[in-house]
Amino acid sequence: MKTHRKLTIITLLLSALLVTSACSKTDSAATGTASTGGKDTKEVATVSEVRYPLSLTFASLDPHLVPTGGVANIDRHIYEQLVAFNTKYEAIPVLAESVDISNDGKTYTFPLRKGVKFHNGKEMKAEDVVASLNRWKEITARAKTSIGASNFEAKDEYTVVLNLSQPSNDIPSQLASYLQFAAIMPKEVIAGADAKGVKEFIGTGPYKFVEYKQDQYVHVAKFDDYKSVDKPADGVTGKKEAFIKDIYFDLVPDTSTMFSSFLAGNYNFADITVDNLNQVKSLPDVEVQKVLSSDYNVVFNKKAPITSNLKFREAIAAALDVEKILVGSTSDPNLIQLNPSLINKDSTDWYSEAGKEKYNQKNPEKAKQLLKEAGYNGEELKLLTTRDSGGVFYNPTVLVKDQLEKIGVKSKFEVYDFTTMISKRSDPSTWDIYVGSFALQSSPSQLLYLGKTYGWPEDEKLQNLVKATTTALTKEDKRKAADALQAYEYEYLAAIKIGDFATYKAVRKNVTGYNYFEGPILWNTKVLK
């Protein structure tokens, strides 16, 4: 008989920061404890409708299909996973009762919660989980790295099993990630999906999908039959209560428009630029939070004629002054963090300083010599970017372009709206360099730019080293695997790490019970009238 142990993946420690959204209608409220504002609130008038602005455009709400965390800001209210991250980046059961792992790390067993309803009234069972996760792992390159050819299987109506050909330590992290996250849907919805995605948006979350008004808003409404776990709320885990009846996620790609609407009182939440910071701090009814959220990386297209040349990539790595790029992109030194590691410093299992001597070289003379060795003849590079999302992509791309020009590399912008940029990014004929904002990840195997389909780093040694990080089971083996992978990545240069950065968020003080963790979480939230 096999013995089992419980696995909890503990990595990057971030604090859940408190933010929220806007309001219009009035309702009577039950007792609640304020997360924003910090005081207990009893029998007060609250709003039943909230409008929440997102600097976002997208092609699909299909959580399996979209390789960006932005859509998860909406989808996490509609869908749930077997496990999800708490604020310590531990993978905690949500739709699963537990995660049981065999001693050899090859067999994962997921007993399911019973009585959980989909938004169409159907009870969630193993057949739905199996259909959802087998589709997810075929679409998601990061999951394929860990799972390989194995499939999820139904042991019985309420038990799902995954049998792997070799040990893997990061299955819970992959299932908990919100990038192309492993949402559970009815098997009939999965069966009806095509290349453009699912036709219906049906999950088990506290809110159900109502309407998507193209490029304007997504409307979700309270799901009256939602079955919550009875544990303290933490990150995207624990107790979830839908106090707000209707949420409209307004799609506002222009941050200046969002900020103007926030000042006018249309929203209780907004992203704040450095230029607007002092103005917001002067408002007595508003709190400002700083959220460490992402890192910048320069990603190379390894199928393009110029950037497939390793000497050319080495030249760019030698030239870049990453601190200038970070400061210039944010205009606030308090928002940046120099970090040579592929993973955040708080991740004790995976943080590495291997190869750090090649980080932030800012050596233009070395770069020029490497360009000669690369045989560079003045060809013009295509820099893929967008002006959407408040300049998060465009601003660092401008600064990278400026530094490239100083060593004699010619380049031009290929500027699109956000959705088109994401589409173009999957076409190797349309770009050479992409400067991206990437959500902080809990393990190396989740880094998109190391996956074969993202910039196409098809180097066999690199992929084997990524795989080795997923099969290391002890802390010592994880450390060795992380160091080996990072040392080689600084040689291969699938991407160049620029650094970590934070953003400012504003939330009005009449909001209670609301947390921001890798995006807005509107369940458990009340907006006081």
Image (spheres, rainbow, N blue to C red):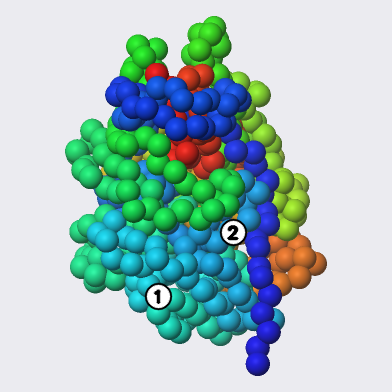
> Is mark 1 in CB contact (under 8 Å) with mark 2?
no
Between discs 1 and 2, the one toward the N terminus: 2
Q: Residue 214, located in which quarter of the rendered image?
A: top left
**Which quarter of the rendered picture does the N terminus lie within?**
bottom right
Q: How far apart are labels 1 and 2 at the CA level? A: 20 Å
Q: Residue 304, located in which quarter of the rendered image?
A: bottom left
Label 2 sits on a secondary structure element that is: strand
Above or below for 247 versus 204: above
**Image position of 186 (left or right of 154):** left
Image x and y of residue 297, in percent: 54, 44
Image x and y of residue 24, in percent: 30, 22
What numbered label is drawn on residue 126?
Answer: 1
Image x and y of residue 204, in percent: 36, 57
Q: Which residue is mark 2?
A: 91
**Which quarter of the rendered picture does the C terminus lie within?**
top left
Dot 1 crowding, Cα within 10 Å, few <14, some 14–19, many 20+ = many
Above or below for 54 versus 147: above
Residue type at the position of mark 1: Ala
Q: Residue at x 55, y 61 (%)?
A: 93
Q: Nearer the viewer, residue 463 or 382?
A: 463
Image x and y of residue 415, in percent: 32, 36
Q: Residue at x 48, y 20 (%)?
A: 510
> Disc 1 or disc 2, which is closer to the eye?
1
| Residue located farthest toward the right when viewing the structure as drawn | 476
Above or below for 343 versus 334: below
Q: Residue at x 59, y 47 (%)?
A: 232
Q: Nearer the viewer, residue 467 or 166?
A: 166
Residue type at the position of mark 2: Ala
Q: Nearer the viewer, residue 389 or 159?
A: 159
**Image position of 250 (left or right of 328):** left
